[in-house]
């Protein structure tokens, strides 16, 4: 099986809302919610993808040829590559019932761990989703990152107890999920958090705390003030706010504001190893990719995930070699240009 076969198989299983496009750019599924699309006219998801394409890499092969090292350390854990699978919740509602949140996470978490990376897992209105996600992470010795939605404090406490029980090496909160249409006026309630509330949650976590949904330097500094050890520059794939800036547009200013004081991860429209290289050059330590991993699972299960990871890693290694960077720390801003 190759990646094209993964895509072809996915189209027979993934339902009608997602088209399993050759390039997941947000165009065919715009304004498809429930489904994989973005809020409103779908502009933000499309812009996420397009802005990475406007950045070019600077080729330089006048350098000593060395072994490429793509390894990343995060919170004391070693990973083979600087990318992670993103959290996806309500899989049956947004895609098809071929997979439930439980079976999807079982496949994704184990396949990622077997191939040297980690998966973020999603959260949902059904409490069994987090139970199953943390069980999947426990089965791979904690090599996964549960993502808790910004519920009320009592619910968050219950979820964090599951996280600690699973031995997860970190936990994330997608604070921007407060803008998801299907979370409005639901029980338990979800909503934005003050710095003080976030600090209490970070303290309760007991493991490194990652705040997902940061789109300004100011917000990054507030997350740092609250005790976050890492942030994810993210607009939730365009699913929470139409006409939002692309993550590629804001990443450099956020990296400047953070100034190395905590880890920066970025998501949103990153679809290739070349895109990963660009993100690292602009100041990210790692990236998260979500929707294409759904296609990989539906199209080939664990083998589909392995094939997609190998595709990304081969593209990243090739870009690094052709730009004269032989480790992640050698990737610098001067290796890319904005047209």
Image (cartoon, rainbow, N blue to C red):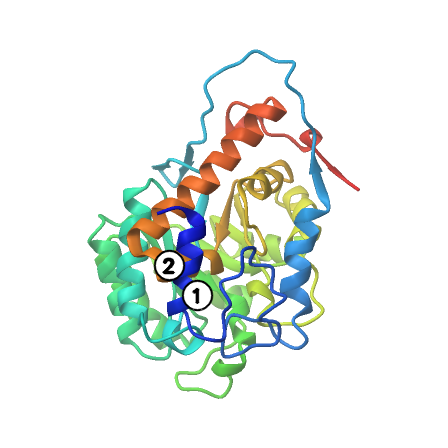
Instruction: Name the residue tied to disc 1.
Output: 11
Per the image, label 2 sits on a secondary structure element best described as helix
Instruction: Name the residue tied to disc 2.
Output: 299
Quarter of the view holding residue 103: bottom left
Query: With respect to residue 309, does 195 lie above or below?
Result: below
The answer to which of 190 and 205 lies nearer the viewer is 190
The answer to which of 101 and 203 lies nearer the viewer is 101
Q: Can you give x and y, in whole percent of width and height, for residue 96 in the image?
A: 38, 74
The answer, for residue 168, to whether it is visible in the render is no
Query: With respect to residue 38, does 327 lie above or below?
Result: above
Name the residue located 37 percent from the left edge and 79 percent from the top edge.
125
Q: Residue furthest right?
A: 339
Per the image, label 1 sits on a secondary structure element best described as helix
Task: Answer few, some or many: residues within 10 Å of disc 2's Cα (few below 14, many 20 plus, some between 14 and 19).
Answer: many
Name the residue located 22 percent from the left edge and 55 percent from the top edge.
138
Q: Can you give x and y, in whole percent of width and height, for residue 174 in the image?
A: 48, 64
Quarter of the view holding residue 204: bottom left
Q: Is residue 84 left or right of residue 21?
A: left
Image quarter of the C terminus: top right
The answer to which of 305 and 10 lies nearer the viewer is 10
Name the residue located 37 percent from the left edge and 69 percent from the top edge.
13
């Amino acid at each position: 099986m190759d990646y094209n076969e993964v895509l072809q198989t996915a189209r027979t299983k993934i339902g009608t809302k997602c088209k399993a496009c050759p390039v997941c750019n947000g165009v065919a599924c715009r304004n498809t919610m429930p489904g994989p699309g973005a809020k409103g006219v779908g502009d933000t998801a499309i812009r996420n993808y397009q802005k990475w394409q406007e950045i070019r890499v600077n080729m330089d092969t006048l350098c000593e040829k060395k072994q490429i090292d793509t390894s990343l350390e995060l919170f004391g854990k070693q990973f083979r590559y600087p990318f992670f699978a993103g959290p996806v919740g309500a899989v049956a509602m947004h895609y098809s019932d071929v997979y439930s949140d439980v079976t999807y996470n079982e496949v994704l978490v184990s396949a990622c761990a077997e191939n040297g990376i980690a998966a973020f897992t999603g959260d949902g209105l059904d409490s069994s989703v987090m139970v199953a996600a943390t069980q999947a992470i426990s089965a791979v010795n904690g090599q996964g990152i549960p993502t808790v939605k910004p519920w009320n404090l009592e619910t968050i406490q219950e979820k964090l107890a599951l996280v600690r029980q699973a031995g997860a090496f970190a936990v994330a909160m997608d604070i921007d999920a407060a803008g998801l249409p299907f979370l409005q006026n639901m029980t338990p309630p979800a909503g934005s958090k003050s710095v003080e509330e976030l600090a209490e949650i970070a303290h309760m976590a007991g493991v490194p705390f990652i705040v997902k949904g940061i789109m300004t330097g100011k917000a990054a500094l507030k997350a740092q003030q609250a005790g976050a050890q890492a942030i994810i520059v993210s607009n939730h794939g365009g699913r929470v706010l139409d006409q939002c800036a692309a993550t590629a547009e804001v990443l450099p200013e956020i990296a400047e504001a953070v100034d190395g004081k905590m880890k920066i991860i970025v998501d949103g429209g990153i679809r290739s190893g070349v895109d990963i290289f660009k993100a690292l050059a602009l100041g990210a330590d790692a990236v998260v990719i979500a929707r294409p991993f759904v296609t990989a699972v539906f199209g080939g299960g664990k083998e589909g995930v392995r094939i997609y990871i190998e595709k990304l890693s081969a593209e990243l290694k090739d870009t690094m070699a052709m730009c004269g960077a032989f480790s992640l720390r050698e990737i610098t801003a001067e290796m890319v240009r904005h047209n």
